[in-house]
């Protein structure tokens, strides 16, 4: 999932944002169209970007007032938010703060403390002077403006501004005499710029996704007992929702969990491989559109309650598990199998603890290469 998709789907879920204008380079327009179609993004318009940052932003603003940039003009907004898709972790709270500040002051932008001292070099490559770090702040995104102010500022820009400038707040001050309100931003407003930033972004996303797990059981005694023990073992590490339902019917509790953005599910059954029950849960996940943004982890836990010491799952069933998991991967659902032995009650808690450790490892790592594997606790 690209940071673009994270950014757009996040913005599209905020009800008070009427339209999302995505400005992209000409060679990436078709790619962006395919992403929007694939993930079902709503209220999104693609606009061809310019050769510089300011020219791209100006093109995005023009769709509200100039026919040549849009097949049909969008309703001009009171406030426009300008944000970078390379900052995917913006929160709705900071968006709301800069919008409210822009309504009052005409312009507003997020800032963060400088983490390094800024220096200037002389012509000979030696130190000329340094800035007192405590007096300065790093300008971040998002920024918000009354539409008429920022559009007027861009209309007055020189070619030098459009080709070499980078700060939108400065344009509002320079051409419209609008002093922007500076809003303290959060640490998550950093840019995904270098390759190492992609690893950091992936780590943050995985950590956020692994904060909650839903344990689903039916009313059978053995299954319910394992569900209870698993809940007790997991709750010290993660928020656990434990529910007992029949997946053959819709359940409002489960639907509430979907809407609460839980991306991890453990479905416990006492069959060797209950593909039908797993498929029913997959159908419900797809209907909820939950897998559109992030991969959902679905762990199908099978209880070995057989007295036969030679109990095993044959190659045919393992092949079915692998094939099913491969099909689900295309739908952004990562399916793993987990076998737990129920026969020896004396070590049952220890076995469940081992299962809990495997579950935590799977939901934290979210490794697509392990899908379809049947792990043994």
Image (spheres, rainbow, N blue to C red):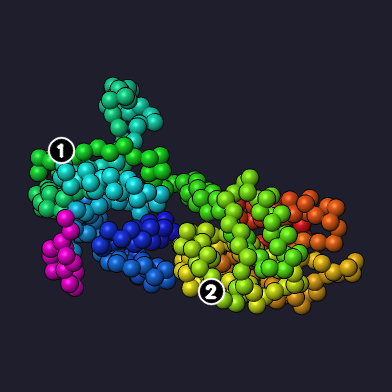
Q: Is residue 51 above or below residue 312?
A: above
Q: Which mark is residue 332?
A: none
The residue nearer to you, when weighing 133 against 260, is 260
**Does 20 sit left or right of 36 as displayed?**
left
Residue at 75% over, 69% down: 270
Residue 367 can be seen, yes or no: no
Residue at x-position 16% and y-position 43%: 104
Q: Position of residue 38 (x, y in %)?
A: 42, 71
Residue hosting label 1: 179
Which residue is rendered at x = 48% and y = 59% of the image?
261
The residue under label 2 is 250
Q: Which residues are magenta?
A: 64-78
Question: In front: 243, or 305?
Answer: 243
Instruction: Report the number of numbered marks.
Output: 2
Callout 2 secondary element: loop
Quarter location, residue 310: bottom right
The answer to whether 141 is drawn above or below residue 358 in the figure is above
- Please state, as top left, top right, bottom left or bottom right, where the C terminus lies in the image: bottom right
Q: In the rendered view, does 89 fall on the left or right side of 167?
A: right
Q: Residue at x 54, y 70 (%)?
A: 251
**Is residue 40 something that shows in the picture?**
yes
Q: Position of residue 302 (x, y in %)?
A: 73, 66
Q: Which residue is more in the foreground, 42 or 72?
A: 42
Q: Position of residue 24 (x, y in %)?
A: 30, 61
């Amino acid at each position: 999932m690209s940071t673009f998709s994270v950014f757009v789907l996040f913005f599209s879920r905020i009800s008070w944002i009427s339209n999302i204008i995505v400005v992209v380079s000409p060679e990436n327009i078709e790619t962006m169209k395919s992403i929007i179609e694939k993930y079902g993004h709503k209220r999104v318009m693609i606009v061809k970007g310019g050769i510089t940052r300011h020219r791209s932003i100006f093109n995005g603003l023009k769709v509200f007032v100039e026919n040549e940039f849009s097949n049909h003009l969008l309703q001009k907004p009171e406030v426009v938010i300008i944000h970078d898709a390379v900052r995917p972790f913006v929160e709705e709270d900071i968006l709301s703060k800069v919008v409210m500040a822009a309504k009052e002051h005409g312009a507003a932008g997020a800032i963060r403390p400088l983490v390094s001292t800024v220096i200037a070099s002389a012509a000979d490559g030696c130190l000329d002077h340094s800035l007192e770090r405590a007096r300065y702040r790093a300008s971040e995104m998002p920024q918000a403006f009354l539409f008429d102010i920022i559009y007027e500022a861009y209309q007055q820009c020189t070619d030098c501004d459009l080709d070499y400038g980078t700060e939108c707040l400065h344009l509002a001050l320079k051409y419209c005499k609008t002093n922007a309100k500076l809003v303290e931003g959060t640490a998550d407003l950093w840019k995904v710029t270098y390759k190492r930033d992609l690893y950091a972004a992936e780590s943050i996303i995985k950590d956020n996704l692994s904060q909650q797990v839903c344990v689903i059981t039916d009313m059978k005694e053995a299954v319910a007992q394992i569900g209870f023990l698993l809940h007790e073992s997991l709750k010290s590490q993660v928020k656990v929702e434990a529910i007992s339902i029949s997946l053959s019917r819709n359940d409002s509790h489960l639907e509430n969990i979907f809407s609460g953005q839980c991306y991890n599910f453990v479905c416990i059954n006492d069959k060797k491989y209950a593909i039908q029950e797993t498929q029913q849960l997959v159908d419900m996940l797809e209907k909820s559109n939950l897998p559109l943004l992030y991969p959902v982890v679905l762990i199908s836990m099978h209880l070995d309650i057989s007295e036969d010491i030679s109990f095993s799952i044959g190659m045919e069933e393992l092949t079915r598990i692998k094939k099913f998991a491969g099909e689900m991967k295309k739908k952004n659902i990562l399916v793993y199998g987990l076998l737990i032995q129920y026969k020896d009650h004396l070590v049952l808690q220890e076995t469940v603890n081992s299962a809990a450790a495997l579950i935590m490892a799977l939901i934290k790592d979210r490794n697509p290469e392990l899908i379809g594997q049947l792990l043994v606790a």
